[in-house]
Image (cartoon, grey):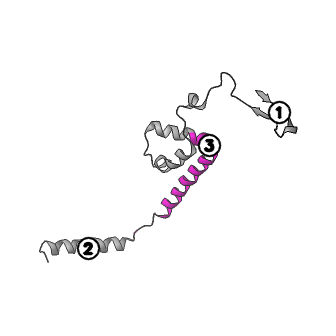
Amino acid sequence: MSKDRRDKAGGAEETESRSAPTGAVGADALFGASVNCEEAVHELYHYLDGELTETRREEIRVHLDWCGPCNGAAEFEAELRKVIANKCKDRVPQSLIERVAEALDEESRQHHGEH
């Protein structure tokens, strides 16, 4: 780390310049191609739907493992989907199923000239 000291009386302030330690390994070397937050959020629904290639799915998963805000968004969306799916499991009454079946049979008989 190197410091650049300037005279404060001249209006400049003390600044530091930092660089990565020698021999440091970047995220790409550890985890492969990195995904930024914008990409992760953009592909979140495809990720949750299982519509990504295995490679891309793994890239997104690694990002979600390391990024709290994106992981929170993914968990929220997954939970929301579960809630919606559970609320949409209304059962159709048997009497309605029978009435629809009878109406379809009647329509079929009339269409084929049977009475």
Q: Secondary structure at mark 3?
A: loop
Type of secondary structure dominating the magenta stretch: helix
Q: Where does residue 43 sit, x and y in percent of width and height?
A: 49, 47
Above or below for 69 versus 112: above
The alpha-carbon separation of the residues under discs 3 and 1 comes to: 38 Å
Q: Nearer the N terminus, badge 3 or badge 2?
A: 3
Q: Where does residue 114 sit, x and y in percent of width and height?
A: 13, 75
The residue carrying mark 1 is: 6
Q: Could you tell me the amino acid type at mark 3? A: Cys
Q: Secondary structure at mark 1?
A: loop
Between residues 55 and 39, which one lies in front from this camera angle?
39
Q: Farthest residue toward the top? A: 23
Would you say 16 lies left or right of 115 here?
Answer: right
Q: In what quadrant of the picture does the N terminus appear?
A: top right
Q: Nearer the viewer, mark 1 or mark 2?
A: 1
Q: Which residue is painted at 62% across and 39% down in the image?
A: 66
